[in-house]
Structure formats: C-alpha cells, structure tokens
C-alpha cells in the first residue's frame, strides 16, 4: 500500500471538484486545473474529501497511486493558498524591474533582458533584487523560477547571479598569490 496514496485530501471552502471519466477538474476563484486520471486509478469525492484508490495491484499502478494523489493535493492547495518561489539576484548593477506584468532585468549583459509573464503567474519585486513568483499551479511556478534562474546562474567565485532564497551557493577560493619566501635567490 502507498503511504501517500491512501491519505484522503480535504477539499477547502471555495474549491469545487468535478470528477469525470478521464479527468479531474478542480476550480476556485483563482482558476482551474485539469488533471488526467492515470490508468488503473479510481477517484471518488464524498463529504468534502477526495480519495484515490487503485483498481489493480501492479507495480505501475502502485507507483501512479501516490504520484496522482500528490498532484491532486498540490492542485487543491494551490487553488486555496497558492504557491510562491523567491529568487534573489546578487551582483554590482544587477537589477529587476517590472514593466506591466513582465520583467526587465539588468544582469550585466550589454542589453536588458526581458521576461514575459506566463498566464496565471504574478511577479512581485522588492528592493530591485528580490523577485517573488506567485501562482496556483506548483509546476508552472517552479518552471518559471527555473527559467529565470537559468538566465544568470550563481557563479561560485563571487556569488553573483540568481539564487533561490533558501539555496546555499558553495563558494570557491580564488587564485592565491605566489609566495616569494619559498624561492631561494641567486
């Protein structure tokens, strides 16, 4: 039995779950998420609780059981509370500005870098160096954060570039000056 798959999911107030033959549609005021039901699984909703159960007992169905339950839980949590990723940019002259819903960033290149906001994603900028990415779909929020981080990864010598707020960048020691005391003079 899957430890994660057998746990029920509590449906929050304001979230509507519609279970169809092949899909589960989850709606709230924030938006809508449609999840296709994985093969071999049965989804039921009773008394404000969603349950996922396997139809067969194969290795693939057991694997899909916990995965699909986690995806359903993330959809319900996202439509209730939302998800957020925080990126911090470090470096001299590195700045982030909003232009409508899009971002305009100065990342040390000869040109400004523009990043268009995908649907259902909101950017918040604090102090021109802290970027908060908010949305109700966990996968989209994580993908957008990874795409922005990819523009200027943190480098190990000075630590400049984008990093997640909880990420630790391992720093390397730079070149060391050659010691002159060890060489004999002639």
Image: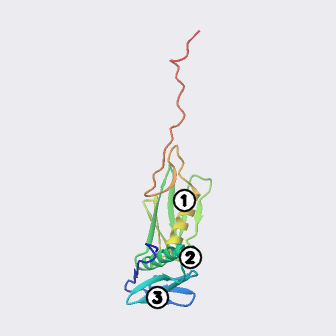
Residue identified by numbered label 1 = 149
Q: Quadrant of the C terminus?
A: top right
- Say which label, 2 or 3, has the lower sequence index: 3
Q: Nearer the viewer, residue 136 or 90?
A: 136
* Residue at 60%, 53% in the rendered image: 109
Q: Are marks 2 and 3 in contact (CB under 8 Å)?
A: no
Specify few, some or many for label 3: CA neighbours under 10 Å numbering under 14, 14-19, or 20 or more: few
Q: Please state which of residues 67 and 140 is positioned toward the viewer in this rendering.
A: 67
Identify the element where label 3 is drawn.
strand
Q: Residue at x 51, y 70 (%)?
A: 141
Q: Nearer the viewer, mark 3 or mark 1?
A: 3
Mark 1–mark 2 Cα distance, whole angstroms, equals: 39 Å
Label 2 neighbour load within 10 Å: few <14, some 14-19, many 20+: few
Residue matched to label 3: 44
Q: Helix, strand or loop at disc 1? A: helix
Helix, strand or loop under label 2:
loop
């Amino acid at each position: 039995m899957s430890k994660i798959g057998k746990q029920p999911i509590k449906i929050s107030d304001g979230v509507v779950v519609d279970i169809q033959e092949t899909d589960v549609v989850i709606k709230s005021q924030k938006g809508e998420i449609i999840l296709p039901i994985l093969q071999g699984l049965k989804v039921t909703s009773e008394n404000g609780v969603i349950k996922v159960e396997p139809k067969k007992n194969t290795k693939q169905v057991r694997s899909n059981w916990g995965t699909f339950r986690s995806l359903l839980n993330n959809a319900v949590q996202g439509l209730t509370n939302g998800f957020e990723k925080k990126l911090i940019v470090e470096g001299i002259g590195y700045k982030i500005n909003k232009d409508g819903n899009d971002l305009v960033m100065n990342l040390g290149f000869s040109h400004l870098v523009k990043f268009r906001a995908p649907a259902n994603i909101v950017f918040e900028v604090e102090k021109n160096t802290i970027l908060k990415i908010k949305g109700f779909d966990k996968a989209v929020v994580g993908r957008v954060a990874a795409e922005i981080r990819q523009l200027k990864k943190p480098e190990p010598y000075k630590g400049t570039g984008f990093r997640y707020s909880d990420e630790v960048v391992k720093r390397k020691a730079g070149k060391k000056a050659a010691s002159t005391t060890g060489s004999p003079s002639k």
